[in-house]
Image (spheres, coloured by chain):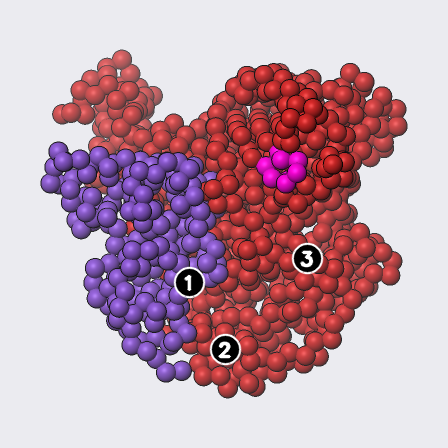
Amino acid sequence: MKDEVQSPEERSAGLKGLGCSRKRVEDVRFTQGRGNYVDDIKLDGMLTGDFVRSPYAHARILSINTEAALAVPGVLAVLTAKDLEPLGLHWMPTLAGDKQMVLADGKVLFQGQEVAYVVATDRYAAADGVAAVEVDYEDLPVVTDPFKAMDPDAPVLREDLAGQTEGAHGPRRHHNHIFTWEQGDKAATEAVLAEADVVAEEMVYYHRTHPMPLETCGCVASMDKVTGKLTLWGTFQAPHAVRTVASLISGIAEHNIRVISPDIGGGFGNKVGVYPGYVCSIVASIVTGKPVKWVESRMDNLMSTAFARDYWMQGKIAATKEGKITGLWCHTTADHGGFDACADPTKFPAGFMNICTGSYDIPVAYLAVDGVYTNKAPGGVAYRCSFRVTEAAYFIERMIEVLAIRLNMDAAELRRINFIRKDQFPYQSALGWEYDSGDYHTAWEKALNAVGYDVLRREQAERLEAFKRGETRKLIGIGLTHFTEIVGAGPVKNCDILGLGMFDSCEIRIHPTGSAIARLGTISQGQGHATTFAQIIASEIGIPADDITLEEGDTDTAPYGLGTYGSRSTPVAGAATAMAARKIRAKAQMIAAYLLEVHDDDVEFEVDRFVVKGAPERFKTMKEIAFASYNQAIPGVEPGLEAVSYYDPPNMTYPFGAYICVMEIDVDTGEHEVRSFYALDDCGTRINPMIIEGQVHGGATEGYAIAMGQEIAYDEMGNHKTATLMDFFVPTAWETPHYTTDFTVTPSPHHPIGAKGVGESPNVGSVPCFSNAVHDAFRPFGLVQSHMPHDHWRIWKIAEDLGLHV
Amino acid sequence: MSKMHIKFHLNGQEVEGLAEPRMLLIHFLRENLKVTGPHIGCETSHCGACTVDLNGKSVKSCTLFACQADGAAITTVEGLTNPDGTLGVLQEMFREHHGLQCGFCTPGMITRAHRLLQENPTPTEEEVRFGISGNLCRCTGYQNIVKAILAAAEQLNAHKAPSSSEAVGQNVEAAE
């Protein structure tokens, strides 16, 4: 047999396991247009739902007249809050412990808020119906500035909370205040600040933006009145949690709800939350007895579902005059919009913002975050990041630069002397985390060498001189970033969402002929789970990845899990996959020993088989073992070869990276050109290098967009100014930079295969890197801090304010 | 609203149906004809997810009425697969070079790349980047898409050489 003449190395390569740049199995369907996204679902008699939305940011609703709309041909029903109220569904709980109107109940709190839901035979009739609904509004004073929202005489936004001095996360001290979240040692930090050689202070604003996956959010709800079973297809990053939440708020028993996430056209955090469209579609299907589809338009998406960031971070960083950081203080004002619908683990109302000590050994630190209501859309999702890690990374990486300016030091050197050293891991941070592993100095030196840092600095200095002599109008900026993430939420002991512990799961079934199916509690949105998770199993039990089917997203078949966001799939579900595979391997060992007539301990695993120790010619392949498990009566061993694992990680994982960007900036036009972008990522064990590289390209491009132009902006009346792709910046291939990727490997000590997760690192790391490059270009002229996004106008304005235009 | 009778060639086959005059081509394709390769990403002509090839031009089908396509020859990504069911050259190169992740932009992107390589069979990287700048992708950062299109151009050009075998010739034809 061919198999028997192959060396273990050859057999191992044939598995396409860990470390293989295996081509994606998903792509055969996707490249032919055979994906199955939610809007591709078409059921008999299916109706369409669409929303009447508020044109005002803050207004009282005097009346809603649906008569004309109901007369529109094709319109079957118009739902308002009054219709939902008897069902108790006119409000719904948010993931952050607040509640949110499903349909406007007496007033609206942001422009684009859902006011009425029109159900019609098709999308055109629904649009006609929406246009025919008459709503009488009385406008109210608008607050879009979170600082003004805390003025004593600011308008009351949430009248439903009148008199409530206690919120989901402690005391509320003002009618527009949501929570205060404190971490670290305030007194000790203030004492350090008072006595430090140097204290740099700055306000760092991370502006409001939006994940904007190319596919908007949507669902199809189908209530079968005969069986009493509700099937809900949707763009859900957490299908199991959606099922539980749907059951709790609708009263339908959980076994009678089947939630299916089909193919998802990008998520980036936008598809974690529960939106009014889902609730209204379920109700509409129950009312009409027909399937109801709701899919957002792009404008609906940018205006109403899931903004990200909007953190005003006031920072103070203390250091010795030699540059050793002695303390960090941060007060953040968080603009949450009209409802607190942040998608964070329950005990973390500001997510993992307390990773804001970054990659540095900072002995004392204090963080306080105040959440505030304004007349903007709710959301606060983690746009390709793990719960506010992007905000934290941007904050510390700007503060390091600000401190470098203050100390008149090179920012690369300042980082180097403050990094947590390799021998300090596991490292207890001043804000409460235990960093599992890292080797920052090695990564940093590799990065600086790769880009030729010293040469670049000399070129930059020469350019500056040429600029001063009037020979050029372009400056060079060198952007540096060393970020540390905290991903893989997380240990059930401190991480849950609505009381659901954030474990994850995998079930593996080996078929009699030696191929397999695995099902997970996660759901891919482009990450390539069907490809990579099969690779983990291939390496663990020696079945070729090509012989393993992978399924996710159907709550009737997949084991319960908390879904895919916060780079948690590989750290949590990936660990569950390895653990389930190991259970199978353990049983396979017993079967092999029985078949080989030796003791269990006398066989050992080798690539794809169990071999008798010391007698390599005696073995049983996994294929043979699989068949035996189905056709032989083995004493003391149950038939079949299946396992399931629910994995509760002992800790988060802490991926890190070193990014360096070189940017040319035209002082007169404000235009920029990214000359090079180098990204070194350390995500621990690398499962599929091709997919890792693709994740880095994509995440860095999102970061490029955010840093250089993308924002959700409102005017003072609360009008949304960036609700189409004409105004909301999404880079094309033309302006997107070229990336050079690199890596180091520091395996996670507690993850079964040492993997840490990578999907979000490039967004987290690239935003400060691009932003620092802009700041760095103008550092010689005295620029300390200028808020993102650094679009052409804002960069031009920096130069103008610095007197560089003559 | 009264409906119009619309007939056109779609991926080499004649199709027909009824549509209101206001119905957009993308809705007619997706909802009436159940051709769901082209996607809807913005409905304002910015994202290119709905790109189809219409009479030899790349067209965003969200900004064209279905009735305007009457009598046209339309190719969607479904029409770029080889007759034997294997992946066409562009499709294969997108797979080979990891030129897609979530897959939502992919049908529009490949359909646009198909036309780009007709317009310019030997594009530079810069020309590819400019040539696909009407199609947005949120996952890949474009780098591998550009690589895939350049690789496809190379393959198609190599296959056009006189020495190419018959089987290869069919491949090129299908990809065209």
Disc 1/disc 2 C-alpha distance (Å)? 18 Å
Crowdedness near tag 2: few (<14), some (14–19) or many (≥20) residues, C-alpha within 10 Å: some
Residue corresponding to mark 2: A128
Task: Return the residue nearer the eye: A552 or B49.
Answer: B49
Residue range of the region highlighted in magenta in the rendering: A665-672
Q: Chain of mark 3?
A: A
Q: Is residue B63 above or below residue A785?
A: below
- Which amino acid type is marked by label 1? Cys
Q: Quadrant of the C terminus of chain A?
A: top right
Percent coordinates x, y for residue A620 in the rendering: 23, 26
Q: Say which of marks 1 and 2 sits in front.
A: 1
Name the image quarter holding residue A373: bottom right
Task: Return the residue nearer the eye: A377 or A564.
Answer: A377
Task: Return the residue nearer the eye: A646 or A73.
Answer: A73
Crowdedness near tag 3: few (<14), some (14–19) or many (≥20) residues, C-alpha within 10 Å: some
Residue A558 seen by the camera: no
Judge left or right: residue A33 versus residue A453. Answer: left
Name the image quarter holding residue A628: top left
Percent coordinates x, y for residue A534 in the rendering: 35, 37
Disc 1/disc 3 C-alpha distance (Å)? 28 Å
Chain whose colour in the figure is red: A
Residue A535 seen by the camera: yes
Which label number is shown at residue A714? 3
Crowdedness near tag 1: few (<14), some (14–19) or many (≥20) residues, C-alpha within 10 Å: many
Q: Chain of mark 2?
A: A
Residue contact between numbered discs 1 and 3, judged by CB atoms under 8 Å:
no
Chain whose colour in the figure is purple: B
Q: Quadrant of the N terminus of chain A?
A: top left
Q: Is residue A52 magenta?
A: no
Magenta stretch, main secondary structure class: loop
